[in-house]
Image (spheres, rainbow, N blue to C red):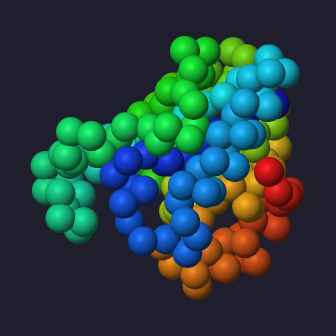
Amino acid sequence: MALIVVDFQKGIAAFPCVHPVDGVARKAGDMATAFRSRGLPVVLVNVTGVAPGRTEHGHPSGAFPPDFAELMPELNAQPSDHLVSKQMWGAFTGTDLQAYLRASDVTQVVVCGVATSIGVESTARQAHELGTNVTLAVDAMTDVSAEARANSLEQIFPRLGETGTA
């Protein structure tokens, strides 16, 4: 089992969200501490740019401010954590995440982060498609849209795996 924490980073924490990002990130940080204490892998994911050729979000070069990708201190990142930097919504495409999980004999992941309907849902969908068992810690995630979050929680997540709390 591994914990995948998606996009709790300085640049995204600045966006207005349904729940205060720092409180939700603390729950993710508490889960990360619990996983580490049991010797289980912790994967911290950040977004460092946009997919090549994508310009719809005002970043034609794919470049963000220098501190945009800095992980939030609530995660208490450790040298043993595996960092995945992505340019897509999901954490598997174009990264070493699948190889890392396979090398660690991981068959189940717990996913949390921001945004529920984008990075978290995309990562959970990809994990599911790869045959990994998925659990979603719904109180350790938030979104910029209450409606999009509700759709993920009510319609999508029950089809991808189990839901629970931190």
- State the residue at coordinates (30%, 45%): 68
Question: Is residue 9 left or right of 29 when viewed as pictured?
Answer: left
| 116 versus 79 height, above or below | below
Q: Position of residue 127 (x, y in %)?
A: 68, 44
Q: Position of residue 57 (x, y in %)?
A: 24, 66
Q: Quadrant of residue 19?
A: bottom right
Q: Quadrant of residue 74?
A: top right
Image quarter in which the N terminus is found: top right
Tell me, yes or no, if residue 68 can be seen here: yes
Question: Is residue 90 left or right of 139 when viewed as pictured?
Answer: left
| 10 versus 77 height, above or below | below
Q: Position of residue 155 (x, y in %)?
A: 74, 77
Q: Position of residue 45 (x, y in %)?
A: 51, 38
| 133 versus 2 height, above or below | below
Q: Residue extending furthest left?
A: 61
- State the residue at coordinates (35%, 40%): 69
- State the residue at coordinates (50%, 27%): 83
